[in-house]
Image: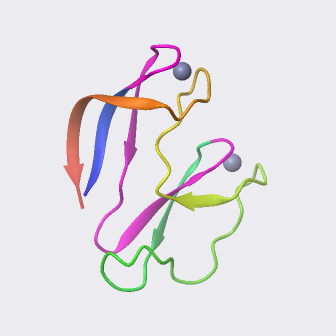
Amino acid sequence: MGMMAIYKCNKCSNKFESQEGGGFLFDELRCEKCDEMKRVEVVGKNSRKPKGKVEKCKCSGNFVSGLRPMCPKCKSRDISVEKELVHYD
Ligand SMILES: [Zn+2]
Ligand SMILES: [Zn+2]
């Protein structure tokens, strides 16, 4: 379900390595502002509902599920997968 990949930014053509997805018993949330990742346990398989309360990021942004990785160069989330590296769950 989760995947590490090389991504290409559709805006500035920058290539970068990142990951997205999550697993059966966890989800990977991303900060909407700085793209910090946080792994949280979820309630039941594939429910995507975090157990307990999710704290805010240290940059004061919210952690959100299902966001695409952010281009580290121009902060765009308009990206495509260039090459899939590893799948995990
Ligand atoms: Zn943040
Ligand atoms: Zn970019």
Query: Residue 76's spot in the image, x, y percent?
Result: 57, 30
Residue 27 covered by magenta stretch: yes
Colour scheme in the image?
rainbow
Indicate which quadrant contains ligand 2: top right
Residue 80 covered by magenta stretch: no
**Outermost residue toward the top in this view:** 13
Q: Is residue 50 above or below residue 19?
A: below
Q: Is residue 27 above or below residue 20?
A: below
Marks counted in the figure total 0
Q: Is residue 44 above or below residue 73?
A: below
Task: Report the front residue among 45 and 88.
Answer: 45
Which residue is at 59% across, 43% downward?
Answer: 35
Which residue is at 48% across, 40% downward?
Answer: 69
**Stretch in magenta:** 8-34
Query: Residue 17's spot in the image, x, y percent?
Result: 38, 30
Q: Quadrant of the C terminus?
A: bottom left
Which residue is at 58% across, 83% downward?
Answer: 52
Q: Is residue 88 above or below residue 49?
A: above
Task: Report the front residue among 81 and 50.
Answer: 81
Query: Residue 50's spot in the image, x, y percent?
Result: 51, 77
**Outermost residue toward the right in this view:** 60
> Is 58 left, or right, of 46 in this rendering?
right
Q: Quadrant of the N terminus?
A: bottom left
Which residue is at 51% across, 82% downward?
Answer: 51
